């Protein structure tokens, strides 16, 4: 395969994964009752609000103007300018009926999918702002896969309907977290220089995540010696901790530690990194 063909294939892969995730969210919500829609999915947001947030982001990416922002104190869940921008869309769509909101979601994601498929590889890989800093539009869309999948899991947690926790979309979401793992282990977890850490995910996504700290923390293919600290946990719990969805202290009993347990616990309580 030529370099151009590889670029085109990667664009198609990312776009189709995003389309799969949007379809999964739409299918999940289709059978929800009013009580389901009112379930608390995140602090300050019910299921309706989470979907409004997803819609707002896709409308923003389509070039729509932001609605008027919230005035005054809107709650402790809004902690920064990005949070206030997100809240603007949530408030603007809060009075939509659940059926109309789901129709809005299907409409904007269909439009976005058509637009993404029509983009040239050059457009798709052009420099762009992303929530992770300046990168490319392609990177932004990979982050969108992670964001949308995480919000699907928020919705599922609100109604106690677990699912879609393995497969290609979940694997792509994990890839996004792995890109931040050096920062998580080295900066947030303060793993000391010369140490090594193995995070073993037992499923639904099974993966070993080895990290070494040699001046800076970085993910490696493998750790040559016995890791300084090892953490063994489900990918479900790992995602919730990394996304700040789970109280870390309450989760420690569900993590198996080996090696330097004090370091392992220190790392486990500092996995959250998302905005």
Image (spheres, rainbow, N blue to C red):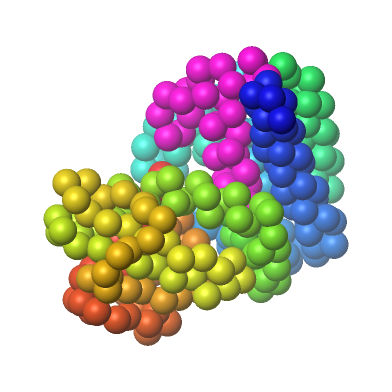
Query: Which is nearer the eye, 199 or 65?
Result: 199
The stretch of residues the image draws in magenta is 121-149
Quadrant (top left, top right, bottom left, bottom right) of the N terminus: top right
Compared with residue 2, is residue 92 higher up or lower down, i.e. above or below?
below
Magenta-colored stretch includes residue 134: yes
Name the foreground residue: 239 vs 209.
209
Q: Position of residue 247 (x, y in %)?
A: 38, 69
- Find residue 190 and report its image quarter: bottom left
Residue 93 lies left or right of residue 127; in this view the side is right
User: Measured from the top left, where is residue 210 in percent x and y?
Assistant: 37, 61
User: In this view of the protein, which residue sits in the foreground, 155 or 100?
Assistant: 155
Q: Position of residue 185 (x, y in %)?
A: 29, 56
Residue at point 59% right, 21% down? 125
Question: Which corner quadrant of the image does residue 108 belong to?
Answer: top right
For the image, the number of numbered tags is 0
Q: Could you tell me if residue 137 is visible in this image? A: yes
Q: Is residue 267 depicted above or below 47 in this figure?
A: below
Does residue 50 appear in the picture of this structure?
no
Whole-percent x and y of residue 238?
46, 66
Which corner quadrant holds the C terminus?
A: top left
């Amino acid at each position: 395969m030529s370099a151009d063909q590889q670029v085109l294939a990667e664009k198609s892969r990312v776009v189709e994964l995003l389309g799969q995730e949007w379809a999964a969210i739409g299918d999940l919500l289709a059978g929800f009752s009013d009580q389901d829609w009112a379930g608390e999915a995140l602090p300050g947001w019910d299921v309706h609000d989470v979907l409004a947030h997803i819609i707002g982001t896709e409308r923003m990416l389509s070039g729509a103007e932001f609605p008027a922002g919230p005035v005054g104190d809107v709650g402790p869940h809004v902690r920064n300018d990005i949070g206030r921008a997100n809240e603007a869309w949530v408030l603007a769509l809060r009075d939509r009926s659940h059926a109309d909101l789901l129709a809005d979601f299907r409409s904007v994601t269909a439009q976005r999918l058509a637009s993404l498929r029509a983009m040239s590889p050059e457009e798709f890989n052009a420099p762009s702002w992303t929530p992770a800093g300046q990168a490319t539009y392609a990177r932004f869309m990979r982050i969108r896969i992670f964001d949308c999948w995480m919000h699907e899991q928020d919705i599922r947690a609100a109604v106690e309907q677990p699912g879609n926790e393995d497969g290609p979309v979940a694997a792509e979401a994990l890839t996004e977290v792995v890109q931040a793992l050096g920062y998580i282990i080295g900066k947030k977890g303060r793993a000391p220089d010369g140490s090594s850490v193995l995070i073993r995910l037992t499923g639904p996504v099974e993966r070993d995540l080895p990290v070494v700290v040699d001046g800076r923390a970085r993910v490696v293919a493998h750790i040559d010696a016995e890791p300084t600290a090892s953490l063994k946990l489900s990918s479900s719990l790992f995602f919730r901790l990394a996304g700040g969805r789970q109280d870390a202290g309450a989760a420690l009993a569900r993590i198996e530690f080996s090696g330097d347990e004090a370091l392992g616990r220190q790392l486990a309580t500092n996995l959250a990194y998302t905005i």
